[in-house]
Amino acid sequence: MASLGAAGLAGITLNLATSILTRADLIKRLRSSQRDIKQQLEEMDVLRLILEETGKQFLSSGRASKAAEAATYVCQARFGELSRLMDKFTPEEEHTDIEKQSKKGVKMNYTASIKAHYTAYDRKLALQAFRDSVLLLRDLRSR
């Protein structure tokens, strides 16, 4: 068996160290994605509650402007888009009960974690769009 030599051994050691660091970085990013999804689900629930309360206020007053009606349709469309993105990563029951979310946390398998990491930007944009539309509708109600 041939001797590796110092250069060969150094190369193998460097390659192994790089692999370990890359894996550690990936695990760190995947855990971050899980935390992000949990926070996004919590915010999504709060926004959904604001939307429900605003809708009830419109119903109790018996009047809604055309702008409010249009904003309601926008909220509905943006909620659908956000839900579509979030449903890929969480069980159905976690969408409806914020208490369960807080106690259980969001647990994903490895494949779902990778998908979560690579869709983070889309989820962030969808959540911002939904938030903006809900707050616009709420502002229209206060007028």
Image: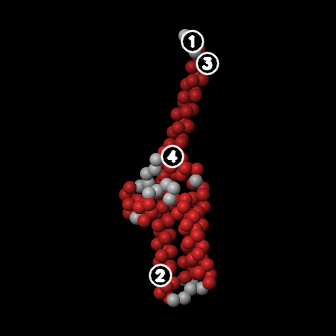
From the image, state whether disc 1 or disc 4 is nearer to you. Answer: 4
From the image, state whether disc 1 or disc 3 is nearer to you. Answer: 1
Q: Hey, what amino acid is under mark 2?
A: Lys
The answer to whether marks 2 and 1 mark residues whose Cβ atoms lie closer than 8 Å is: no
Marks 1 and 4 sit apart, C-alpha to C-alpha, by 40 Å
Marks 2 and 1 sit apart, C-alpha to C-alpha, by 79 Å
The label on residue 3 is 1
The label on residue 7 is 3
The quarter in which the C terminus is drawn is bottom right
As displayed, is residue 129 above or below residue 17? below
Asked if residue 30 shows in the view, the reply is no
Upstream in sequence: badge 1 or badge 4 = 1
List the single residue furthest toward the bottom: 62
Marks 4 and 2 sit apart, C-alpha to C-alpha, by 40 Å
Residue with the mark numbered 2 = 56
Density class for disc 1 (Cα within 10 Å; few <14, some 14-19, many ≥20) is few
Upstream in sequence: badge 4 or badge 2 = 2
Q: Hey, what amino acid is under mark 4?
A: Thr
The label on residue 41 is none
| Residue name at image x 60 percent, y 61 percent | 125
Asked if residue 49 shows in the view, the reply is yes
The answer to which image quadrant residue 84 occupies is bottom right
Residue 141 image position (x, y, % from top left): 55, 82
| Residue name at image x 49 percent, y 64 percent | 43
The answer to whether marks 3 and 2 mark residues whose Cβ atoms lie closer than 8 Å is: no
Density class for disc 2 (Cα within 10 Å; few <14, some 14-19, many ≥20) is few
The label on residue 111 is 4
Report helix, strand or loop for mark 1: loop
